[in-house]
Amino acid sequence: MSRERSTLVGTPVVVAPGKIFLIGEYAVLEGGPAVLAAVSRRAVAQYVPGLEPMSEVVAEAVKRAKGELGETASALPAGSVLVNTDDFRQGDVKIGLGSSAATAVAAVGAVFESAGISVAQSRERIFAIALAAHRAAQGAEGSGADVAAATHGGFIKVESPSSSVTSVVESLVPPPELHLVVFWTGEAASTTTMIDGVREFAKKDRAAYRQHIENLGDIAGRFVAEFRAGNANGAVEAAGRYGKRLAAFGAAASVPIVTPAFTRAAGVAKEIGGIAKPSGAGGGDIGIGMFTAPGAALLFARALPKPLIALDIDVDVSGVRRRVPGEEHSGNSGMFHV
């Protein structure tokens, strides 16, 4: 499929967005809060009769969606869901914007729509099914934050009280003076490898691990409070503190969460009155800059030293949905700059 998403005639086409973390990486794995935004890089899915599953994530999503719908899904011909994730690539490299979570959500949505069940009226069901499918395919629990962003869209706060409890999701309205830049370090990173390294640290020194996680959770909580209050300055300051704590956490765990590329980006951001930090597990890949003036955000995007580049991304305000001809392909929030 091309970037224009040529799709088959017949069954409905469903799209689900990717995500970025503003705050809460690692803390959310231990019950702390995280704030994410759904972004305008999307998985595109369509149920295809006779198709075999293209991945374990799709197989789990289709199986569980059909199981949830029961007799309603029995009228569907045997088949699976075709998912296009070209949006999650920068050149030939897949970038860390949550493609597997978006795939799970879009695949479940495609089964629902093909069975005559509206995605728009089934978000909670879709979230629960996609989260279970995503966890089963990856062989891990996870916070479900990326699945929540793909399902609900916009800005959300996510908390997971425990791995056995479905994440609690709350929609948030961002401060009007907050301006964001999403950037790529020019290299891919393995989330699984990063998290495995942190888990190993937890086994070796549980007390130190808990202290770092509590510090991260406290700062994330402050960010949420400032974000809710519409205080862009307070949110940016808290995010800067979080980035520094991530660096200390990574150093203690001997895991390169904050790489030299992120350190360079943070230095550029500081010079023009903002902050920059990893968005996600770190180790490379995706970062986010936060500013309280649009001019500063634009300057940061243009001043990033190579190989860092600002990505053309905006907020996806709608989350998973059935695609209609001629729909707008950008959230047009005005918060993201490139």
Image (cartoon, grey):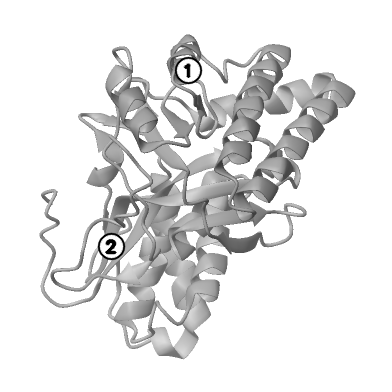
Residue 141 seen in the figure: no
Q: Is residue 256 left or right of residue 66?
A: right
User: Which is more toward the observer, 130 or 272?
Assistant: 272
Numbered tag placed on residue 276 in the rendering: none
- N-terminal-most mark, 1 or 2: 2
Residue 215 place in picture, x, y as percent: 78, 30
Residue 254 seen in the figure: yes
User: Which is more toward the observer, 122 or 329?
Assistant: 329
Q: Which residue is located at x 40 percent, y 54 percent?
A: 102
Q: Which residue is located at x 32 percent, y 12 percent?
A: 305
For the C terminus, the image quarter is top left
Numbered tag placed on residue 262 in the rendering: 1
Residue 168 place in picture, x, y as percent: 67, 62
Residue 211 place in picture, x, y as percent: 84, 27
Assess disc 2: are there few (<14), some (14-19) or many (≥20) residues with their C-alpha within 10 Å of its C-alpha: many
User: Which is more toward the observer, 143 or 130?
Assistant: 143
Q: Determine which residue is flagged by label 2.
A: 45
Which residue is farthest right?
Answer: 207
Q: Which residue is located at x 85 percent, y 20 percent?
A: 205
Q: Considering the numbered disc 1 on the image, is that residue within a helix, a strand or a loop?
A: helix
Name the kind of residue labelled 1 in the image.
Phe
- Mark 1 vs mark 2: give the one in front: 1
* Rendering quarter of residue 92: top left
Name the kind of residue labelled 2 in the image.
Ala
Q: Is residue 36 above or below residue 106?
A: above
Q: Is residue 107 left or right of residue 68?
A: left
